[in-house]
Amino acid sequence: YDAGTGVGAVGLGAVAEPFGFRAAFGLSALLLVLVAPVTRARRAVIIETGT
């Protein structure tokens, strides 16, 4: 986890160090679940408006 680059690698490493990999990947999955509806709504607006 510390050999990667980018925000994801740093974020996973920061959570995995004190709490373990289950917490790190669980947090990542939770973040994706929370962000998905916003992403879908934005995509729908882009498709409707064409911008």
Image (tube, grey):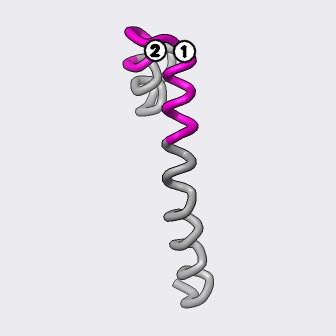
Please provide percent x and percent y for residue 9: 47, 25
Q: Quadrant of residue 41?
A: bottom right
Q: Residue at x 56, y 57 (%)?
A: 36
For mark 1, give the secondary structure. helix
Q: Is residue 44 above or below residue 19?
A: below
Q: Is residue 1 above or below residue 30?
A: above
Q: Residue at x 38, y 9 (%)?
A: 18
Q: Residue at x 49, y 11 (%)?
A: 20
Residue type of the residue flagged with mark 1: Phe
For mark 2, give the secondary structure. helix
- Is disc 2 surrounded by few (<14), some (14 to 19) or many (20+) residues within 10 Å? some
Q: Main secondary structure of the magenta part?
A: helix
Q: What residue did someone put label 1 on? A: 21
Q: Earlier in the sequence, mark 2 or mark 1?
A: 2
**Cβ–Cβ under 8 Å for marks 2 and 1:** yes
Q: Residue at x 46, y 14 (%)?
A: 16
Q: Which mark is residue 41?
A: none
Residue at the farthest bottom position: 49
Q: What residue did someone put label 2 on? A: 16
Q: Is residue 13 above or below residue 11?
A: above
Of residues 13 and 25, the one nearer the viewer is 25
Q: Report the side of 43 relative to 9 (left or right).
A: right
Q: Is residue 10 above or below residue 50?
A: above
Residue type of the residue flagged with mark 2: Ala
Magenta stretch in the rendered image: 14-30
Please provide percent x and percent y for residue 10: 40, 24
The residues tagged by marks 2 and 1 sit, at their Cα atoms, a distance apart of 5 Å
Please provide percent x and percent y for residue 2: 46, 12
